[in-house]
Amino acid sequence: MCTAFVDPIHPILLQNKKYKNKDRQRCPVCKEKRYLDINNTPRRILYYFPFQHWLQDLYSKTDLIPFLANDIPANEFPSGTVRRSDGWRKKVTENPNINGDRRNQALSMSCDGVPFFKDKNAASGWVCILHDENAPFAVARSPQHSHMVALVPSTYKTETKEGIKHVKRLVEARCCTISPLVSSCSCTYMFVGARLLHLHCVCHLHTLRRDPPSLGALHQLLVDNFLVGQDTGFPTTDHSKPRGHHERIFWMKVVLLFIIGDYPGLGKMANMLHSGRFGCHWCMHSFNTYTPGNLVALGNRRHCPQTHPIRKDHRFDQEEERLAPKTRTHSATTAKAQEIEDFVGTKKGKETLQKTSGIYGVNLFSLLLLFDVIWDMLPDMMHNLKGLWERWLMPAFKGEKLTSPPTKPLMTYIHRGKSYEYTAEEQKQRKAAYALKKKRYVETKRVNVAAYGCCLLFLCLNSALVLY
């Protein structure tokens, strides 16, 4: 999902050949085929629903229109709402592109990975939802007035090696007189000139689960839509005005305030690596390996001011004299992302550059007006409450000592020449599960033997009756 195979609408993206991919048959980044050879099947599908129609529909609801104005005084809203934030003042109140018409809209977006069914191991995907921040809080967050702008399934289709060999054999054995051709695997083919068309073949396709490394295709579609909305706007009919009124039809302009999501979701939307040594979205604090597969940020006292007493607290091993890690900025991040995008070298060299900077590639949201790719990407409150406040801050406020759980002793278990390490409790659970499995196997075998004996006895009696 590196790029969208469409041509953009806005001139900023249209003048870049990288984003003109309507007629491409291979991805310009990873070089994978757009379609599989079997059935001409798309390798990966993205579902995108343009948001201008949703915004136009809001102005057909006459009872909601009075609450969608962007010039309502901020003191009429409770403390903590978006209308009282500095971002609203900067992007809406003081922005001449938006404050020229009170009907222009300010939007926010959330992104998260969700399972499609109750079984979390089944199909899943990434969902992006837009909210209209002009509306009252309860209305803006309601499902009826939100808009799912995109759905990216975490599945892709691929061909088996047998399927590729099967197609090659058919092409090599092609004869002009064979049309249509029916193979031995119940798949129907037809040759049109020198091209082999697969009319029906599903036995050589596999659907696999794998998250896309980036959502570049979604970024392209979203940013293209937002650029058109902020520069020219969308033609909208205001149904609160009578027919023939000169303000009934207007051009609605939009602005993106912020993007909110959990940490993996922010990494996808920011086109950054939110894992590894430099996985912090807001600074260059390096992470260290605490246990295999787990990283931890040590030396957090560095973030305190130089004169803060906790830097010299005797409860720690030594005094903290290091300076605070460098904070990420919009301009520096954009420049580094462009450097990675223009890198000419080996694939391994580019991956090293990405890991040492924590940036995967160019973030197209940097093209939007007044949008900061660092500080306009916000973590959602649910994960802050569950992971930060309840686990760390509240116990610290209560005076409780925070210690890491003791490491459980490991036991080495050798099976078929391979060694595995388990705790004593895990080993006990494995033995109990194996004993239960063996018991069920013995019971099943007994039932099968009894059933086989009954069938054999029935056949013998039946034969004896026939002979008699």
Image: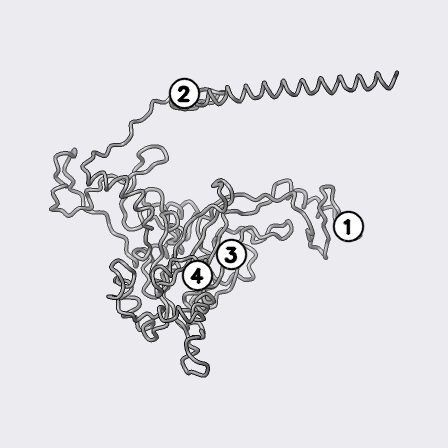
Task: Find residue 90 and report its horizontal and vertical position in percent.
Answer: 27, 66
The image quadrant of residue 396 is: top left
Q: Amino acid at mark 1?
A: Cys
Task: Name the secondary structure under disc 4.
Answer: helix
Q: Which mark is residue 150?
A: none
> In the image, 248: left or right of 35?
left
Q: Residues within 10 Å of mark 2 (few under 14, many from 20)?
A: few
Mark sitting earlier along the chain (2/1): 1
CA separation in Å, label 4 and label 1: 48 Å
Mark sitting earlier along the chain (4/1): 1
Q: Amino acid at mark 2?
A: Thr
Q: Which mark is residue 47?
A: 3
Mark sitting earlier along the chain (4/2): 4
CA separation in Å, label 3 and label 4: 12 Å
Q: Amino acid at mark 4?
A: Leu
Task: Name the secondary structure under disc 1.
Answer: loop
Task: Find residue 166 and report its horizontal and vertical position in percent.
Answer: 68, 43
At x 15%, y 42%, the residue is: 321
Select label 3 or label 2 by which is in front: 3
Look at the numbered discs 3 and 4 and tell me whether their residues touch, using CB distance below 8 Å.
no
Q: Amino acid at mark 3?
A: Tyr
Task: Name the secondary structure under disc 2.
Answer: strand
| Of residues 78 and 113, the one drawn nearer to the viewer in this rendering | 78
Look at the numbered discs 4 and 1 and tell me whether their residues touch, using CB distance below 8 Å.
no
At x 36%, y 46%, the residue is: 274
307 above or below 147?
above
242 above or below 64?
below
At x 49%, y 59%, the residue is: 48
Q: Which residue is mark 1?
A: 175
Q: Residues within 10 Å of mark 4 (few under 14, many from 20)?
A: some
Q: Which residue is mark 4?
A: 222
